[in-house]
Amino acid sequence: MRLILYRILSVFIVVDLVAIVYFITTANLQKAYLTMAIIPAILITQVFIIRCRCGCRPGLWLLAIWTMLLDFELYFTDTLLLRRCPKCNRDLQQKDWWEDA
């Protein structure tokens, strides 16, 4: 269930980016700033929503790697297709491989 919520939040980031572009083009900066403030909250939620049995937080790994490489498109791809822990390579979709945070 948490992996599905993780993916839904990834899609919500894309929708939020579209909303930001819309509000900027319509010169409604107050709403654009408000929607920009939502993105860090979503990213922080994604970091802490999944925890592998090995103690790794795959969301934090993905965010750190793709932030350092400045490749936002690959970050979206990895978050939508996240199936295995980047540290121990265990399957995250099996309930016994991840624990509640």
Image (cartoon, helix red, strand yellow):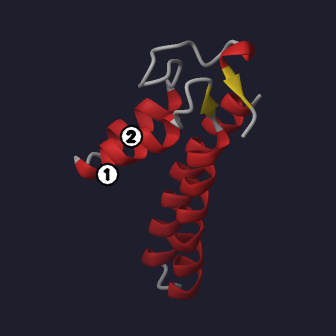
Amino acid residing under circle 2: Tyr
Residue that badge 1 annotates = 67
Which residue type carries mark 1? Answer: Thr
Is tag 1's residue or tag 2's residue first in the polypeptide sequence?
Answer: 1
Above or below residue 28? Residue 74 is: above
Q: In screen coordinates, is 38 left or right of 71? A: right
Residue drawn at x 42%, y 31% is 78
Task: Work out which residue is located at the far left of the displayed protein and give it.
Answer: 69
In which image quadrant can residue 6 be found? top right
Q: Nearest to the eye among marks 1 and 2: give it.
A: 1
**Which residue appears at 56% of the width and 87% of the height?**
30
Q: Is residue 52 above or below residue 31?
A: above
User: Which structural element holds mark 2?
Assistant: helix
Question: Measured from the top left, where is residue 21 in percent x and y?
Answer: 44, 67
Residue 37 rendering spot, x and y as whole percentages:
56, 73
Q: Nearer the viewer, residue 12 or 62?
A: 62
Q: Residue at x 54, y 54 (%)?
A: 43
What percent of the width, then of the height, locates residue 24?
Answer: 45, 77
Is 100 left or right of 31, judged from the image as shown?
Answer: right
Q: Are marks 1 and 2 in contact (CB under 8 Å)?
A: yes
Q: Residues within 10 Å of mark 1 (few under 14, many from 20)?
A: few
Q: Which mark is residue 75?
A: 2
